[in-house]
Amino acid sequence: GQIVVLSVPSTVGLSSSAEVIDKPIVITGHQAPISAMTFGPPGANIIYTADSDGVIVEWDGLTGTPKGRVKNVNEEDLDLTGKVHAGATITSLAFSSESNTLYSAGWDDFIRISHGQNCVDKLKMEAQPNAMTCGTSLVVVMTVEGLVLVKDEQIVSELIRLPYTATAVCISKDESMLYVGGDDCNIYIYTVSLSDSANPLTESYVIKGGHLKAVQSIALSHDGTKLAAADSRDVCVYSTTDYSAIVSKGRWCFHAQKITCLTWSPDDSVLASGGNDDDIFLWNIQKKMRRVNYRFAHRGGITGLRFVGGNVADGSGDMMLVSAGNDGCVNFWDVKGDVNKKFK
């Protein structure tokens, strides 16, 4: 998945118009389906993507070009492929803005810790990790057997076993509230307290009857007032004041397969969803009967979806959407025109 451009010795005759390079240039990317995506520090224009081969790529979000692969500092790269998770599928990426730390979860049962393009440490999980969510410094790891809390690059809780199978997680910015979707079609809301490592979560509410199928994706609005959740058909939105439905099941039900991604625009006016049906939809709370649909966005399904927003410093990314998919591509979508046409 990498191309090396080498400098040509001066003894080799080149056309006068040929560009001369002083040192080798490595052109990188993905040769396998992209399985996860996240953004780097706010305003830094950095995007991280990971794939099913265990490779993590750092991208320049301004130009859309890869900056390089994340590499293991303490492990020898025998096959020169730069696989951070030793060939295992990376299921999730999360970035802590407080410590500028990238966390990656893989089917090798490790959480890998990276700074920039250097993977410097790893944490062993008791069970296979399938998803992560990060507030500012607290990371919640969703495994096949329960939840694990990680903070400051250390595990700070025991494995929290649940009476249901967790299928999606999302934490509030202030890290006080955790939202967990279950295979029982419910959404569980917990208050978070790190003072008790054995019992850091206290159940405060359960949203029942909102979904007919297992909840696959959850996203909290930036102002914290709305919770979006999706299954394999419906996209629903709930008020976080009393958890009543703002958009209930049966209204935003145009996806044909599992909905894998949800993301809010910076002003919370637009909700975007992506799924295994290759489609991306844009929704608006004020115009519930309208929608924008981008068909065949990624062959094989969408695995990452984020509005650029604060990832650029000048605010130009407010209606710029970034998507990643099983086709191994990262796409940029300027949705401003479609949003204005449909929702204004």
Image (tube, rainbow, N blue to C red):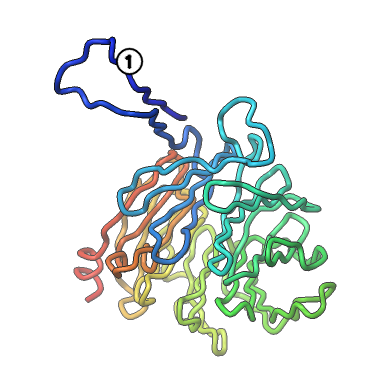
Above/below status of 292 relative to 14: below
Instruction: Report the residue that reaches farthest toward the left.
Output: 16
Q: Report the label total.
A: 1
Going by the image, does 268 lie left or right of 33?
A: left
Front one among 249 and 52: 52
Badge 1 element: loop
Q: What is the quadrant of residue 99 in the picture?
A: bottom right
Residue neighbourhood size for the residue with mark 1, other residues' Cα within 10 Å, grouped as few (<14), some (14–19), many (≥20): few
State the image coordinates of residue 219 (x, y, percent, origin top left).
51, 69
State the image coordinates of residue 325 (x, y, percent, origin top left).
45, 45
Instruction: Report the residue that reaches farthest toward the front.
Output: 10
Instruction: Report the residue that reaches farthest toward the right.
Output: 198
Above/below status of 97 relative to 242: above
Q: What is the quadrant of residue 313 in the picture?
A: bottom left
Front one among 60 and 221: 60
Q: Which residue is mark 1?
A: 9
Task: Indicate the amino acid at tag 1.
Answer: Pro
Q: Residue at x 82, y 73 (%)?
A: 197
Q: Quadrant of the C terminus?
A: bottom left
Q: Residue at x 23, y 64 (%)?
A: 338
Front one among 70 and 207: 70
Going by the image, does 340 lie left or right of 238?
A: left
State the image coordinates of residue 280 (x, y, percent, origin top left).
37, 56
State the image coordinates of residue 167 (x, y, percent, origin top left).
65, 60
Going by the image, does 122 lie left or right of 264?
A: right
